[in-house]
Amino acid sequence: MVGPEHYSGEILNLDQAAILARGLQAAGRRIVFTNGCFDLLHVGHVDLLARARLLGDCLFVGLNGDESVHLLKGPGRPVVAEQDRAAVLASMRAVDVVVVFPELTAERLVEAIRPDIYVKGGDWDTGQKIAPEAAVVASYGGRVVYLPYQTGRSTTRLLAQIREDPPPRN
């Protein structure tokens, strides 16, 4: 595990991430956190992660594990296994830390890491569909930021397009 002086593209467990977050915050760094399935990475994901990273000094990403993706998204999901999704996310310039979690929501992760800023896509800011993690963030005085959602950019949509358009025959 890395210390506050060096972090980038790390895949950590919950305890390691919480310890690193405390060290970074003690060093005056602002932690940003977001979470999701990130099954088939697309431009909407890349944009969200890049904009989230700009809000602070380091970006922690909570990644839904395979079982929770299956429960949230249904049969045939995830398309990409959690270890591969974690490795792809960790390789991105915007992402400093990735933590895979088994639960359906990231509330336990948010409570352990206590990010200064919690980010979700604007599709969550509808008045009826507020991210469940937002209450945890509010409980310790953190800030919740909803970034604009890129309409039409989703893994579900990509999969539908793949199914509708069979690959060319060689």
Image (tube, grey):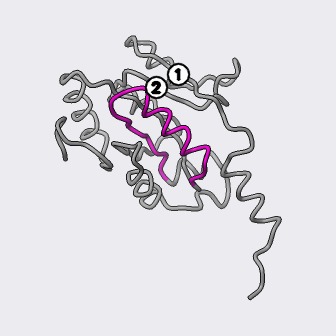
Name above or below for residue 11 compared with residue 125.
below
Q: Are marks 2 and 1 in contact (CB under 8 Å)?
A: yes
Q: To which quarter of the image does residue 163 belong?
A: bottom right
Neighbour class for label 2 at 10 Å: few (<14), some, many (≥20)? many
Residue interval drawn in magenta: 41-65
Cα separation, mark 2 vs mark 1, equals 6 Å
x 42%, y 44%: residue: 101
Q: Is residue 48 left or right of residue 164?
A: left
x 46%, y 25%: residue: 118
First in residue order: circle 2 vs circle 1? 2
Residue at label 1? 145
Q: Is residue 48 magenta?
A: yes
Q: Is residue 59 left or right of residue 69?
A: left
Q: To which quarter of the image does residue 40 belong?
A: bottom right
Front position in the image: 152 or 63: 152
**Three-letter code, disc 2:** Tyr
